[in-house]
Image (cartoon, rainbow, N blue to C red):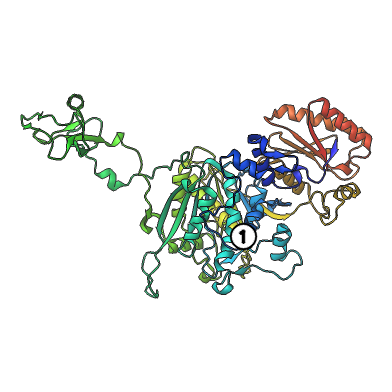
Amino acid sequence: MRRMRPGDPETRSLDLVGENVAQLKKLFPSAFTEDGIDLDALRELLGGDPAGGREKFGLTWHGKRRAAELARLPSDGTLLPRPAESVDWDTTRNLVIEGDNLEVLKLLQKSCAHKVKLICVDPPYNTGRDFIYPDSFQDGVRDYLALTGRLDGDGGRLSSNVETSGRYHSAWLDMMYPRLFLARNLLREDGVVFICIDDHEVHHLRAVMDEIFGPENFVATVIWQKVYSPKNSARHFSEDHDYLLVYAKDADAWTPGLLPRTDEQNAAYKNPDNDPRGPWKADNFTARNYYSKGTYPITTPGGRVIEGPPPGTYWRYSERTMREMDADNRIWWGRDGTNRPAVKRFLSEVRQGRVPQTLWSYEEVGHNQDAKRELLERVTFASSDSVFDTPKPTTLIRRVLTLATRPDTEDIVLDFFAGSGTTGDAVLQANAEDGGNRRYILVQIPEPTGHPDHPTVADITRARLRAAATALPAAPDRGFRSFALGESGILRWDTARQDVEQQTLELVDTIAPGRTDQDVLYELLLGRGLDLSLPVERRTFGGVAVHCAGGGLLFACLPAPDTIGRDRVEALAHGIVDWRKELDPAGEVSVYFRDIAFRDDVAKATMAAILDQYGFPFVKSL
């Protein structure tokens, strides 16, 4: 049984650079030498100029290189479970995570990679009042904890990005670039992202999205009419709209859902001849495109001879097809049978939905005042002034869900600028209405509000979701598991020292003081790339507790020091063996023990031998 060491996969988030290098090495082994990758050789293999250095089109700003590097740096933080802040912890599959979304997105790279169907975010608009996340280049988690007042820091705080700061647009781009880069990795191949934005940064955001997703995967710029009346106090124009930029992971793989047909659309279908196929609408029998077989004369059932189609047009169908359609009562000749022919389009045969358009009115999807009213119905505030300035109505997010998700699948919806929790509320509403199984993952930094009832925005997020759960009893899954970003509780070593391996040997216990079994268990889940919403069970063998996650994919035994003596090893080992056999998991099984829980090396070696005998290849102590 090997003890966990620095650099093991469980100790850090996904190394994106290492993953990319490994993939390149598989594809282009000749581009690698003993010193690493030969970029000139790689360019030649790809048909490019080995000299490189040519200018290229794109958006650039001071700090872009640093922002890109931030996305590639692994996180050594973790997500700490908070059952007391949750709803239906044991059964829910929804997640609410409090923390800096840059670090959280890094931590989700293993467990959520290529699994998210929809990303729907409403980031800060950079209006001069919005909070900008001051990312640390060196130590993201500790910087975050310092900024949120949990550690002694250098006095830094979240601050608004005022236009006089000198880096007004650059600071916003510094924040958005690494987060969007990481978010793309989480999308399924048929996934899509909707980003709300206004005129302050829409042009910059479009350029960044083109770079990260590729211009070929741009889908649409939706214009949302966010107000129901003009602002007469406007200096120049009343700003009545926001945008939703829509990008697919792969535009060829993503197809939007259809919107429900309106009563007005259906009302156009009548049934004047009592056709048993139901209501229909007359469609033109002519077309302007040339058709060699579309210029024949027609004799109507009433005896009128029509010499041919009107000048400049052609019959849509050949004479033979026309007669077959007429025999099937698919042509309408008018009540007296003498009109020019029209095609009967039956309501039962048309697409049962509307193709989405790029202009969304407030009558269809709501406006900002609707959003404030909805929030006040869910969360109690000391005064209405405490309400967010520009929340989004759930009707707007419901429209996005209709286009991007399906109720009959467990589509994951990610919002890493969760704000007041509108996305989670909308997911619950959609599931309650259509019986769907959509899941949400919300991420929100604990931005201070100055109000004692809800000290942070993350508190408002959770409060709203609790209220939504109560108000929507028909939703199949109304709960959420709450987590908070924190420092790793495993393998605490000083990275400033060079002898990291020696430090690990010196540590008597590699679990931080104050960390519970549950804290360590979920950190192991993250490290192994397992879903944080997986069910967790607890059983006791030989008087020792064992946790099992994911239906047998991970076992963790983390008792107090000297708990596992030679007298308990066999009962404990065979209990784990039998439990795995009972669950029969599909996938590699991991087993972890707390190293100081073994009373001596004999007990530890015996445990490793028994588990190895029964085919457990992945057993570690920590």
Q: Residue furthest front?
A: 51
Taking 129 as reference, is 495 above or below it?
above
Q: Nearer the viewer, residue 291 or 104?
A: 291
What secondary structure is found at the residue carrying circle 1?
helix
The image quadrant of residue 267 is top left
Q: Amino acid at mark 1?
A: Ala
Residue depicted at x 91% and y 42%: 562
User: In the image, is 186 to the left or to the right of 516?
Assistant: left
> Is 483 placed above or below 291 here?
below
Q: Locate residue 472, reporting x and y percent.
A: 51, 50
Crowding near the residue tagged with mark 1, few <14, some 14–19, many ≥20 C-alpha atoms within 10 Å = many
Place of residue 582 in the rendered image (x, y in percent of width and height, measured from the top left): 72, 27
- For residue 451, above or below residue 280: below
Q: Is residue 297 left or right of residue 528?
A: left
Q: Is residue 199 visible?
A: yes
The residue pinned by badge 1 equals 458
| Image quarter of the N terminus | top right
Q: Residue 94's spot in the image, x, y percent?
A: 60, 47
Q: Quadrant of the C terminus?
A: top right
Q: Is residue 405 left or right of residue 167?
A: left
The tally of labels here is 1
Q: Position of residue 618 (x, y in %)?
A: 78, 33
Comparing 187 with 54, the one in front is 54
Q: Can residue 425 be seen at all in this image of the molecule?
A: no
Q: Nearer the viewer, residue 541 or 241?
A: 241
Q: Nearer the viewer, residue 100 or 499?
A: 499
